[in-house]
């Protein structure tokens, strides 16, 4: 009796919906718009532009998200500037309808935060009397 063939497992990674560089997408596009769109960039340069590590770029390339890379042989991976600019324009975090207001009494994790009290509502300090 022959052994069953092992099943090849494919990991499915969902791309992040948002990333830290989404806030800077417009600034990045504005800064790089004057350069030649056919210019090829190394992963270190792209990581520096996006303010991420090269490990993030590697993971994004392997898992199918992030800026589209161009392969030149088995070891050489470069990024075309025009493709990077297109990717950043798609990642722009500014909603079309404007900025959503943040509730003033919510903290970092959505918990209610105590509002500062006015000095008049604070208890008055008592003067300590010297012991006789």
Image (cartoon, grey):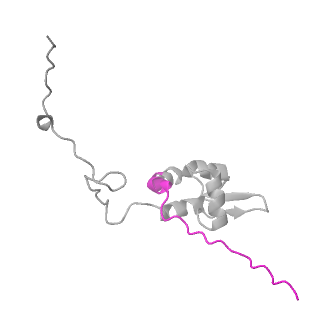
Image quadrant occupied by the C terminus: top left
Farthest-out residue, top: 132
**What's the magenta bit mostly, secondary-structure-wise?**
loop
Q: Quadrant of the N terminus?
A: bottom right
Seen at 27% across and 49% down, the residue is 113
Residue that lies at the very extreme toward the right in this rendered image: 1
Location of residue 121 (image quadrant):
top left
Q: Is residue 64 placed above or below 116 in the rendered structure?
A: below
Residue 19 image offset from top left, x and y in percent:
50, 58
Looking at the image, is 27 positioned above or below residue 117?
A: below
Residues rendered magenta in the picture: 1-27
On screen, residue 27 above or below 4: above
Q: Single out the residue that lies furthest toward the front.
A: 132
Residue at the location (13% across, 25% down)?
126
Depth order, front residue of 58/71: 58
Front in this rendered view, residue 132 or 117: 132
Q: Is residue 89 above or below residue 112?
A: below
Give percent across and percent down for residue 42.
68, 52
Q: x%, y% of residue 16?
A: 52, 64
Q: Magenta stretch containing residue 32, yes or no?
A: no
Q: Residue at x 31, y 62 (%)?
A: 98
Asked whether 97 or 102 is in front, the reply is 102
- Lateral position of residue 75 relative to residue 63, left or right: right
Numbered circles on residues, count: 0
Q: Position of residue 97 (x, y in %)?
A: 31, 66
Using residue 65 as the reference point, say whether residue 9 is left or right of it: right
Indicate left or right for 104 with 81 as reference. Answer: left
Identified at 37% across, 54% down, the residue is 109
Does 2 lie within the magenta span?
A: yes
């Amino acid at each position: 009796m022959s052994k069953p063939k092992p099943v090849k497992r494919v990991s499915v990674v969902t791309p992040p919906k948002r990333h830290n560089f989404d806030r800077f997408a417009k600034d990045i596009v504005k800064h790089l718009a004057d350069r030649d769109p056919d210019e090829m960039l190394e992963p270190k340069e792209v990581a520096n532009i996006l303010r991420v590590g090269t490990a993030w770029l590697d993971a994004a390339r392997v898992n199918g998200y992030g800026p589209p890379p161009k392969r030149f042989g088995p070891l050489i991976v470069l990024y075309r500037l025009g493709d990077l600019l297109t990717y950043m324009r798609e990642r722009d975090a500014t909603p079309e309808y404007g900025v959503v207001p943040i509730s003033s009494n919510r903290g970092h994790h959505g918990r209610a935060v105590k509002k500062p009290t006015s000095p008049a509502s604070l208890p008055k300090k008592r003067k300590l009397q010297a012991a006789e």
